[in-house]
Image (cartoon, helix red, strand yellow):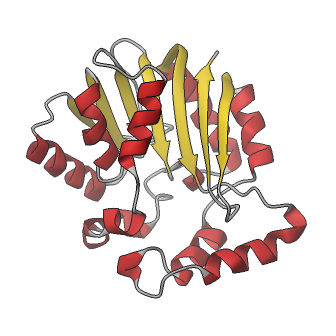
Amino acid sequence: MIDEAARAGPEHLDPVYVVGFDRKSSFDVASEIDLLRSHGLRAGSCLVDVGAGTGEFAVAAARFCERVVAVDVSPAMLGAIRRRVADAGAANVEVVEAGFLTYHHRGRPADFVFSKNALHHLPDFWKVVALARIAGVLKPGGVLRLRDLVYSFEPRNYKLAFESWLRSAPDNPAQGWTRLELETHIKEEHSTFAWLLEPMLNRTGFQIRDVELSDTQVFAAYTCTRL
């Protein structure tokens, strides 16, 4: 078994970096919750957030759920989640130190699994193992919402696609991920092509209901149901 914490990137283990993480990510939590509510998220739901980061989504979703499990491999991120949970008084949020490959779900199967920008830390073989394990967490008909860095450009166009993405990066790291940080992602992390990820989802027990591909061709969001 690979060490997920070691592959999470040293910045995600750094408490100083974690402080500015939400500002860099500029994530529209409300629209994601609205989407899940349109798929049945309600007061009795159980949601598992894998790669929960600072807990921004998990705590926001807790208002609409019976139970939320915020899962992350980084002690620094887990500390941020616990502080956010305490500040919000979100008693229905559980915090678990684990990853895709080590999380063991307790209680009834989850109705929803959410994951944002975490699966790309795993090489493709381990992505498949991770997705199969997520399927095991969800009830039949349960919903997986997966957002990540996923390449949708044609392979022959990778240089043009990457250079366009890199040119769009801010110079100030407080405003987002810089060119150097994006270059590090390309060189050291494990984003895959959409035409590879989608069969992985299908083969591990999911039906893809909706796909959103970014104009930059480097981000994607999938809404899937477990068969």
Quadrant in which residue 5 is drawn: bottom left
The x and y percentages for residue 51 are 42, 46
- Residue at 60% over, 22% down: 225
In depth, the one of 214 and 185 nearer the eye is 214
Task: Locate residue 92 relative to residue 203 in the image: left or right.
Answer: left
The x and y percentages for residue 227 are 64, 15
- Residue at 54% over, 46% down: 147
Quadrant in which residue 206 is drawn: top right
In depth, the one of 22 and 110 nearer the eye is 22
- Residue at 25% over, 72% down: 16
In depth, the one of 74 and 36 nearer the eye is 36
Task: Locate residue 132 relative to residue 177 in the image: left or right.
Answer: right
Residue 51 visible within the image:
yes
On screen, residue 175 above or below 209 = below
In depth, the one of 99 and 173 nearer the eye is 173
Residue 102 visible within the image:
no
